[in-house]
Image: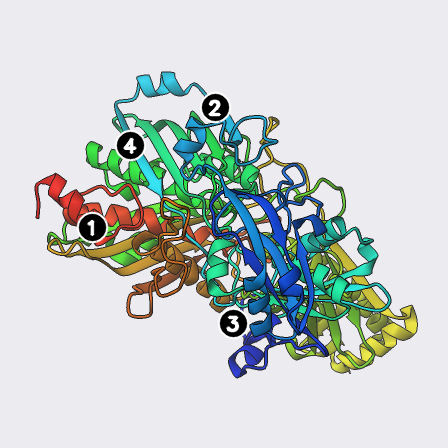
Amino acid sequence: MSHRIIGSSRPRVDGVAKVTGAARYTDDLVLPRMLHGRILRSPHAHARIVSIDLGAARAIPGVHAAIVGEDLPVAYGILPWTEDEYPLAIGRALYVGDGVAAVAAVDERTAIAACEAIRVDYEPLPAVLTPEDALAHPELKVHESNKDGNVSKKVDLAFGDVEENLARADVVVEGEFHFESTTHAAIEPHCAIADFDARGRLTVWSTTQVPHYLHRALAKVLGLPEDRIRVVQPTIGGAFGGKSEPFDLEFCAAKLAMIAGRPVKIRYTREEVFYAHRGRHPMKMRFRTGATRDGKLLAVDSKILIDGGAHSSFGLVTTYYSGQLLGAPYELPAYRFRSTRVFTNKPACGPKRGHGSVQPRFAIECQLDEIASQLGVDPIELRRRNAIGPDATTINGQRIGSNGILRCLEEVERASGWKEKHRKLPRGRGVGIAASTYISGTAYPIYPNDMPQSSVVVKLDRSGQVLVTSGVSEIGQGVETMLAYVAAEELGCELEAIRVITGDTELCPVDLGAYSSRVTFMAGTAAIEAARKLRGMLVEAAAAALECDAAQVELDGGKVYARSQPDRVLSFVEVARLAETRFGTLVTSGGYRTRKVGGDYRGGTIGASPAYSFTAHVAEVSVDELTGLVRVEDIWVAHDCGKALHPINVMGQMEGSAYMGFGEALFESHAFHADGLHRGPSLLDYKLPTTLDVPDLHALIVEANEPGGPYGGKEVGEGPLHPSIPAIANAIFDAVGIRLRALPFSPDRVRAALRGQGGT
């Protein structure tokens, strides 16, 4: 089916504001009489708070409010089953950087001085700072109420007979892999402004990517009715999962504003962002993978230890994600995963782009390369032989619809010149392959309910302006453009006639937020439904005016006519007025409702999705054996997005994902000293790739139409990250014959591996 707007690459609707500097981020907002807040943080990894004296701080001129944990005594958490956080620590500080008090003052300098004046009497306590220590010392509980020592979540699931299949395998590879924690490194730090007005209504402007969940959490913690709270999401300067749950600054700003009677702004410093990060979980993984001599996979067995930090965050889901997405893109007759997430006295980990499944994908894709090497089979051919097809069901009960994995493999093989390079380049240069799959939205909302996950309202004014409102979170991925595209496509109007409002809980219908690559699939589907309802009203009004059958009416580029009499043309504005005359105010709505998917067992819904994307990468590297320096020269990214609704935007997501994976592979390490202090909480010390480091990225769009997706579309925001890391690892093996199983692939690790090989 041909489309007029869908599939074209027009300028993004938010593009001009961002490139001209007109876009207003949270920290750009200044309210009358606004105060500035600051949070005092613990210097100890674990300590009992004996006392806090706010007297000296409150006595400083210009200080209007000061609070401690007992002023906000209600626990919260993004998942309703694991609410173990308080806005400020009560009784004990659980990690370096844990908030213990907060102040609001006339300016930032005064707020800083007030924090320095607060006197806190700490009693340092023994801390557990590694997952091994957390398991070995259950008596040193991070959470005293936790019944299972320091275990946050344990999952043990098996599908098929793993041991029998491994026993009859002709080749079995086994190894340990370590994925270090990494952080999101969004350009914009977290920021929140709260205003509690004279009518008792609270408005919070926040850098959140989940306004709906923040709205619910504010009501719970502050004890306010939900209808008295408004959450507004201004322009966001990057998120990547790092802003997908409530944070202490939002609660503290709100409480301080309620006490002071004036608006309060709190903005994290860059150091605070590192301590609050909720970044990728460190995982220590042992994998066994078996195959027949002709390269058919028989079984995968994994055991994973996950460092969750001090709070649950999304950890329950993370523990399942560490195994639930292993069932594709390959057909596995049997697999098992045993994952244990533990609490430690470090900042909590949470979701980062590709939540929970990037780490195990690194391990399994490296082992597939080992198997191919031992069998003398081309690694791409090995993946072809095992590829799960379309309209299939994985052994753990996930239904695969459209599937472009074979085309992805074909595209990267062709574009990279794989056949001319693999095992044929001079020593020091190599190519590697990896593939993956990812979800297009979670099947179920974070809290159980039967309401729509996403709703969209479309309103047509008699001027011809179309207003699209949705609670979706625009975090840079282009969802406002997607909504405008849908409305313009369905209504046959010009793109310039569309105005989109998002991320405001008072003006927009509910959407659950930007996470798990759900927005295009779910909000896009809701927008189509709403726009088609409105189109039906326009068509009916036009048919009456044109004296033709409704089936003859065309809406195209702001013009409306009957196919049987194309010379008789009405303008879009004329038809809008005719429709309003006929039906009254033109407002329609659409929604996305979850249907039952996933396996019928505990945890079967986690990783279950209405559609799955597929990706393959080839990386080409050069390795300097003297220095151990790895340079990634090129990454070819083929991604099955179902249908590219906005091709340039899709390519940007593919390249951004590959860049992030490349950064984690070679540079990033969110690590801590033995006393719980971060090793480098700044963008000077936390190494990220710059424009001088980034390889040439080649985005190859593959379209395997997904019947349930909007115009056949599915996710592109997270899936293209997964193969980057193992593709680079496999390319390093091709270049110099070493297997790197711990991240990042730093020069010292490369040199150590080469020495172990007998090299330099």
Mark 3, secondary structure of its residue? loop
Disc 2 marks which amino acid?
Ala
Residue 119 vs 566, above or below: the answer is: above
**Distance CA(mark 4)–CA(mark 3):** 45 Å
**Distance CA(mark 1)–CA(mark 3):** 44 Å
Say which mark, if any, is on residue 175: 4
Would residue 99 be found to the left or right of residue 264 on screen? left
Say which mark, if any, is on residue 158: 2
Residue 712 vs 18, above or below: the answer is: above
**Distance CA(mark 2)–CA(mark 1):** 38 Å
**CB-based contact (under 8 Å), mark 1 and mark 3:** no
**Distance CA(mark 4)–CA(mark 1):** 20 Å
Front residue (pair 737, 149): 149
Badge 1 local density, few (<14 within 10 Å), some, or many (20+)? few
The residue mark sitting in front, 4 or 3, is 4
Q: Earlier in the sequence, mark 4 or mark 2?
A: 2
Badge 3 local density, few (<14 within 10 Å), some, or many (20+)? some
Q: Earlier in the sequence, mark 1 or mark 3?
A: 3
Front residue (pair 191, 90): 90
Say which mark, if any, is on residue 130: none
Disc 4 marks which amino acid?
Gly
Residue 694 vs 436, above or below: the answer is: below
The residue mark sitting in front, 2 or 1, is 1
Q: Which residue is mark 1?
A: 748
Circle count? 4
Q: Is residue 331 visible?
A: no
Q: Earlier in the sequence, mark 2 or mark 1?
A: 2
Q: Position of residue 696 (x, y in %)?
A: 30, 65
Front residue (pair 591, 307): 307
The residue mark sitting in front, 1 or 3, is 1
Would residue 198 be found to the left or right of residue 615 on screen? right
Q: Residue at x 62, y 36 (%)?
A: 597
